[in-house]
Image (cartoon, grey):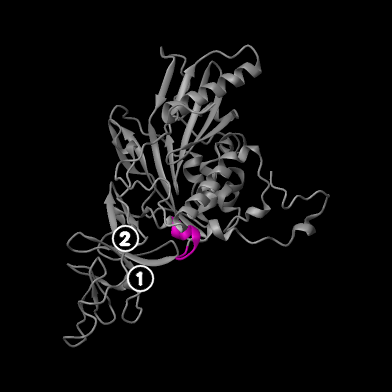
């Protein structure tokens, strides 16, 4: 538990009125910052394919002002927003057969940044065919557009996940067109990923059951706080929580994947009493990225999965948590039914770690922050960080949801030991034999 600001007197707020600064090492994302350089070693989603029509789109990612477009040859360009000539924004440019043309003096840039036309300049000028405007490489995949922002000589292969290739899996967009923007730092959103403990409180006891099964019924297991465990996976952290639900044990397992990805599996169906099975596993249902716009804003993009064997949607009606991960709700509604958005954004633009009092329920969060720090340090040493996928192979996903039909142990202590054992079983199925 952190004791850096341990207040031990009543009505003592004056003692803590002066706030410490944020942890710049982990939270600042602009060019040249430690975390910014770490994040720039990975491919990130920056837009959805449907956003690119007949006009350029201004975006901001990792503290850089950019413009993204699809030229008339169907190639995607991601360029620094301000023209290399006099700084006019290319969001007002004209999309050409090749690249984009600035509205001010007609300079034309190809999708790789090459200056290919300077109509107001004489032939033989020192720019045409020689100058490059800032551009980043892109890959379009299943409705999302990804970009790499790091050193060109260190560009890794485009990163895909093995969950994409699961039998019968179909990928759809998890967010509405334009992505889900939150006015806060990327790391406090990622903190939520390694914190399964919050689900029983924020998403059940505080706001009522926010998670429903495919039949629109509450997942009653969310109302029961479980036994949480955390293991390092090759690509991040496997976060397990085992819960007793009557005659069943549900091991809810999700995975934090470096540096800013969550892998989440499909929640099981309750009640299960009518089934003849004694064990169930459910597939991946969500892959989501939290991409920093700048230090104080983050955008979420992701895939939601459907499977050929299941014609039902993941959720079949609008439910509170569908809205509570985004802004725009009436203030009173946010107060009465807070969700992830309120919990994350209300911490402030950048959480000040020195004001926190971390406890045993924050073990996953502490491990995740340590992993981010290790990634930053690896990049500073000139090494590849964890989960970069340099070999080009799809990354294995360790997350899995498992339910057992199994009676309670003879004592509460025996049942807790059973839950811990089953949670470990789930982890070993994904990660192999774990040390004692």
Q: Is residue 101 above or below residue 288?
A: below
Quick one: SS at disc 2?
helix
Numbered circle sitting on residue 409: none
Q: What distance separates the C-alpha of mark 2 from that of mark 1?
A: 23 Å
Residue 255 located left or right of residue 103: right
Q: Secondary structure at mark 1?
A: loop
Percent position of residue 391, x then y: 30, 45
Magenta range = 30-38
Quickly name the residue at label 1: 81
**Where does residue 308 sit, x and y in percent of width and height?**
28, 30
Q: Position of residue 232 (x, y in %)?
A: 49, 37
Foreground label between 2 and 1:
2
The quarter holding residue 26 reads bottom right
Dot 2 crowding, Cα within 10 Å, few <14, some 14–19, many 20+: few
- Judge from the rendering whether residue 117 lies leftward or rightward of residue 146; answer left or right: left
Q: Quadrant of the N terminus?
A: top right
Image marks 2 and 1: residues in contact by CB distance under 8 Å: no
At which x and y percent is residue 236? 46, 41
Query: In terms of image quadrants, where is residue 63?
Result: bottom left
Q: Is residue 338 visible?
A: no
Picture layout, residue 228 above or below residue 48: above
Q: Residue furthest bottom?
A: 122
**First reached walking from the N terminus: tag 2 or tag 1:** 1
Residue drawn 66% across the image and 50% down it: 356
Image mark count: 2
Depth check, front residue: 280 or 276: 280
Category of crowding for the residue at label 1, using alpha-carbon neighbours closer than 10 angstroms: few (below 14), some (14–19), many (at least 20): many
Identify the residue under disc 2. Answer: 153
Q: Does the magenta segment cover residue 51?
A: no
Magenta stretch contains residue 34: yes
Q: Quadrant of the C terminus?
A: top right
């Amino acid at each position: 538990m952190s004791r850096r600001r341990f207040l031990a007197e009543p009505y003592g707020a004056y003692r803590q009125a002066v706030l410490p600064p944020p942890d710049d090492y982990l939270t600042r994302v602009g060019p040249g910052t430690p975390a910014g350089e770490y994040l720039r070693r990975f491919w990130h989603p920056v837009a959805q394919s449907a956003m690119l029509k007949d006009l350029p789109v201004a975006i901001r990612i990792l503290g850089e002002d950019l413009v993204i477009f699809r030229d008339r040859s169907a190639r995607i360009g991601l360029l620094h927003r301000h023209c290399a000539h006099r700084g006019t924004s290319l969001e007002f440019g004209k999309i050409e057969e090749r690249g984009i043309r600035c509205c001010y003096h007609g300079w034309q840039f190809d999708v790789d940044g090459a200056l290919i036309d300077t109509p107001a300049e004489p032939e033989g000028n020192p720019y045409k065919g020689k100058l490059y405007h800032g551009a980043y490489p892109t890959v379009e995949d299943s409705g999302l557009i990804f970009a790499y922002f790091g050193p060109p000589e260190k560009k890794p292969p485009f990163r895909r996940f093995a969950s994409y290739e699961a039998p019968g899996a179909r990928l759809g967009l998890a967010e509405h067109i334009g992505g889900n923007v939150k006015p806060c730092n990327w790391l406090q959103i990622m903190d939520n990923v390694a914190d399964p403990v919050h689900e029983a409180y924020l998403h059940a006891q505080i706001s009522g059951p926010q998670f429903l099964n495919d039949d629109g019924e509450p997942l009653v297991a969310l109302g029961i706080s479980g036994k949480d465990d955390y293991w390092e996976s090759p690509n991040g952290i496997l976060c397990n929580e085992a819960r007793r639900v009557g005659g069943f044990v549900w091991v809810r397992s999700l995975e934090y994947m470096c540096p800013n990805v969550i892998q989440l599996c499909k929640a099981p169906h309750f009640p299960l009493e009518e089934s003849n099975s004694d064990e169930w596993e459910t597939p991946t249902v969500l892959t989501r990225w939290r991409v920093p716009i700048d230090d104080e804003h983050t955008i979420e993009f992701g895939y939601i999965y459907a499977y050929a064997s299941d014609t039902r949607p993941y959720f079949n009606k609008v439910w509170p948590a569908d809205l509570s991960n985004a802004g725009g709700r009436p203030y009173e509604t946010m107060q009465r039914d807070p969700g992830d958005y309120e919990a994350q954004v209300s911490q402030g633009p950048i959480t000040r770690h020195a004001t926190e009092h971390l406890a045993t329920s924050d073990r996953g969060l502490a491990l995740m922050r340590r992993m981010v720090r290790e990634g930053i340090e690896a990049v500073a040493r000139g090494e590849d960080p964890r989960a970069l996928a340099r070999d080009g192979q799809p990354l294995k996903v360790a997350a899995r949801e498992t339910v057992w039909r199994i009676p309670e142990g003879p004592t509460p202590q025996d049942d807790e030991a059973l839950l811990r054992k089953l949670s470990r079983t789930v982890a070993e199925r994904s990660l192999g034999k774990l040390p004692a």
